[in-house]
Amino acid sequence: MTIGFVYSVLGIGILFVLLTFWAIFDAARRDFGAFEKKAAWILVSAIPFIGFIIYMIFGLKRGKKPS
């Protein structure tokens, strides 16, 4: 393993962690109509690597921004 490969893997890992945290916090701020729906979207967005993708495709447009 070269040092460039290690930095690439770390960079991608940090990116996925940041996007996951963003999805969790965004789902926590939005109004989904019921607490159960909000909790479900927070759990979905917390799935490593693919949770934020699922949230961005399906959940982002379902929740309403806080006014």
Image: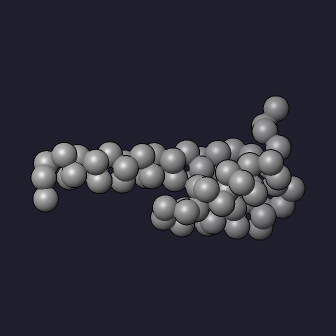
Q: Nearer the viewer, residue 56 or 38?
A: 56
Q: Nearer the viewer, residue 11 or 44?
A: 11
Q: Residue furthest top?
A: 67
Residue 26 locus on image (x, y percent)? 64, 45
In the picture, which quadrant includes the C terminus? top right
Res. 55 image quadrant: bottom right
Task: State how many labels appear.
Answer: 0
Residue 40 locus on image (x, y percent)? 70, 67
Q: Residue at x 51, y 47 (%)?
A: 19
Give the side of residue 8 with respect to residue 33, left or right.
Answer: left
Q: Residue at x 60, y 50 (%)?
A: 23
Q: Nearer the viewer, residue 5 or 53?
A: 5
Q: Let me know if residue 59 appears in the view.
A: yes
Residue 61 locus on image (x, y percent)? 80, 48
Q: Residue at x 69, y 44 (%)?
A: 29
In the picture, which quadrant includes the N terminus? bottom left
Give the side of residue 51 with respect to residue 11, left or right.
Answer: right
Q: Let me know if residue 42 appears in the view.
A: no
Query: Above or below — where is 40 with respect to 18?
Result: below
Q: Residue at x 43, y 52 (%)?
A: 17
Give the side of residue 19 with respect to residue 26, left or right.
Answer: left
Give the side of residue 3 with respect to residue 25, left or right.
Answer: left
Residue 62 locus on image (x, y percent)? 82, 52
Q: Residue furthest left?
A: 2
Which colour assignment does the render follow?
A: one colour
